[in-house]
Image (cartoon, rainbow, N blue to C red):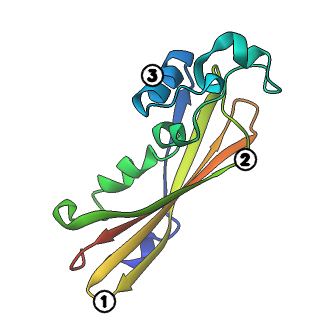
């Protein structure tokens, strides 16, 4: 059982600069050739004034703090029994090339479901102007308890 005293524990801040080429590589990797994601001329003509990142690109910058939680020596999570349970993102504003995204993350809940532990993580990402861009939430199940 994971000790409930860790609910609310915050992890180090992560900073990620959104690169145009990384956005393009990501879009192509997911086989999405939407011009919003990498056609610079098209992006300049949109209401955004530039390209925007594919929504799931948030997995690159927003949930980076999960790794800190995974390797937290206090938690002692059993990786052999850990399963990624669910993940969702709330998109507040589109992310564009050149944005410098700062993400903070914390454990928001720990629960027991039968013989399993469930740990929930939430990350909040803001841009260089302090504007909230993305909220990511993920749940991890540790089968058979920790």
Could you tell me which residue is drawn at 57 percent across and 42 percent down? 103
Up the image or down, 15 lies above or below 62; here it is: above
Badge 2: how crowded within 10 Å, few (<14), some, or many (20+)?
A: few
Place of residue 97 in the rendered image (x, y in percent of width and height, measured from the top left): 63, 21
Place of residue 50 in the rendered image (x, y in percent of width and height, measured from the top left): 72, 19
Place of residue 67 in the rendered image (x, y in percent of width and height, measured from the top left): 36, 48
Up the image or down, 60 lies above or below 17; here it is: below
Could you tell me which residue is drawn at 57 percent across and 25 percent down? 18
Left or right: 110 in relation to 38: left
Between the residue at mark 1 and the residue at mark 2, the CA separation in whole angstroms equals: 35 Å
Up the image or down, 72 lies above or below 130; here it is: below
Between residue 8 and residue 25, name the one nearer to us: 25
Task: Of the two numbered discs 3 and 2 on the same chain, state the one appearing first in sequence.
Answer: 3
Helix or strand or loop: what does disc 1 sit on?
A: loop
Could you tell me which residue is drawn at 46 percent across and 28 percent down? 26
Helix or strand or loop: what does disc 2 sit on?
A: loop
Please identify the residue farthest to the bottom as the structure is shown.
Answer: 114
Q: Which residue is mark 1?
A: 114
- Judge whether residue 1 can be spotted in this image: no
The answer to whether mark 3 and mark 2 are in CB contact below 8 A is no
- The C terminus appears in which quarter of the rendering? bottom left
Between the residue at mark 3 and the residue at mark 1, the CA separation in whole angstroms equals: 42 Å
Left or right: 77 in relation to 118: left
The answer to whether mark 1 and mark 2 are in CB contact below 8 A is no
Helix or strand or loop: what does disc 3 sit on?
A: helix
Q: Which residue is mark 2?
A: 92
Report how many numbered discs are placed on residues in the image. 3
Could you tell me which residue is drawn at 71 percent across and 16 percent down? 42
Between the residue at mark 3 and the residue at mark 2, the CA separation in whole angstroms equals: 23 Å
- Judge whether residue 58 can be spotted in this image: yes
Q: Which residue is mark 3?
A: 25
């Amino acid at each position: 059982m994971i000790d409930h005293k860790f609910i609310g524990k915050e992890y180090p801040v992560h900073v990620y600069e959104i690169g145009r080429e990384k956005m393009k590589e990501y879009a192509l990797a997911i086989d999405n050739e939407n011009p919003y994601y990498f056609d610079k001329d098209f992006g300049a003509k949109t209401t955004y004034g530039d390209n925007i990142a594919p929504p799931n690109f948030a997995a690159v910058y927003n949930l980076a703090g999960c790794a800190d939680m995974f390797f937290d020596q206090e938690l002692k999570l059993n990786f052999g029994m850990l399963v990624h349970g669910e993940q969702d993102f709330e998109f507040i504003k589109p992310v564009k090339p050149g944005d410098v995204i700062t993400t903070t993350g914390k454990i928001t809940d720990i629960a027991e479901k039968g013989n399993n532990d469930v740990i929930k993580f939430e990350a909040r990402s803001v841009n260089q102007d302090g504007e909230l861009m993305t909220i990511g939430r993920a749940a991890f199940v540790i089968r058979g308890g920790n």
